[in-house]
């Protein structure tokens, strides 16, 4: 719904199609970068729990996180000119809305988190490779 609604609103405000495409692409890119950063943190934690963590895994994760922090920090400091200066904050607001939605779902469906954990564990077992 948002994927349709946002461009319609922006078009109705007389914005150019290529500007809208770029703006929404920038906001989506924040999602990719933040996801990659979270994975670089989660991967060593997962390997530790599986008792497979090696020093090279930690080194690679730290280097990767540092590299990913460059565009993350660069997107908020120094702030770009309008409208690019508001995009990181739109993305953060979207994360907050998603977090609130998740908490509401968790309250409404108490077994949600355990169901997610069960599904992740089943997927993990299904695709686990023994070396």
Image (cartoon, grey):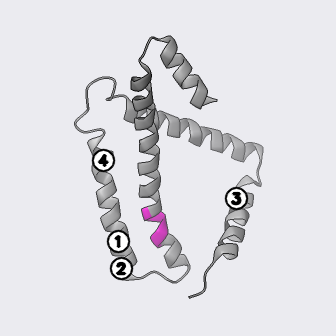
| Mark number displayed over residue 25 | none
Relative to residue 84, is residue 125 drawn left or right?
right
Tell me the SS state at disc 1.
helix
Q: Which residue is mark 2?
A: 56
**Residue furthest toward the bottom?**
131
List x then y, in percent, for residue 51. Answer: 52, 83
Magenta stretch in the rendered image: 40-44
- Do the numbered discs 4 and 1 sit on residues whose CB atoms are within 8 Å? no
Nearer to the camera, 125 or 47: 125
Image point (60%, 86%), residue name: 130
List x then y, in percent, for residue 25. Answer: 43, 36
- Do the numbered discs 4 and 2 sit on residues whose CB atoms are within 8 Å? no
Quarter of the image that includes the C terminus: bottom right
Q: Residues within 10 Å of mark 3 (few under 14, many from 20)?
A: few
Q: Quadrant of residue 30?
A: top left
CA gap, disc 1 and disc 2: 6 Å
Nearer to the camera, 14 or 123: 14
Q: How many marks?
A: 4
CA gap, disc 4 and disc 1: 18 Å
**Location of residue 32 with respect to 39 vertically, above or below:** above
Nearer to the camera, 33 or 107: 33
Q: Residues within 10 Å of mark 4 (few under 14, many from 20)?
A: few
Circle nearer the N terminus (2, 3): 2
Relative to residue 14, is residue 101 drawn left or right?
right
Tell me the SS state at disc 3.
helix
CA gap, disc 2 and disc 3: 30 Å
Circle nearer the N terminus (1, 3): 1
Image point (44%, 25%), residue name: 20
**Location of residue 27 with respect to 38 vertically, above or below:** above
| Mark number displayed over residue 71 | 4
């Amino acid at each position: 719904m948002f994927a349709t609604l946002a461009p319609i609103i922006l078009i109705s405000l007389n914005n150019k199609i290529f500007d809208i495409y770029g703006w929404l692409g920038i906001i989506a890119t924040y999602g990719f970068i933040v996801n990659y950063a979270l994975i670089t943190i989660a991967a060593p934690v997962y390997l530790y729990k599986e008792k497979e963590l090696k020093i090279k895994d930690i080194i690679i994760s730290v280097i990767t996180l540092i590299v990913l922090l460059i565009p993350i920090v660069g997107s908020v400091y120094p702030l770009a000119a309008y409208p690019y200066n508001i995009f990181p904050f739109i993305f953060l607001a979207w994360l907050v809305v998603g977090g609130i939605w998740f908490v509401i779902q968790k309250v409404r469906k108490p077994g949600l988190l355990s169901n997610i954990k069960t599904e992740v564990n089943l997927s993990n077992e299904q695709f686990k490779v023994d070396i």
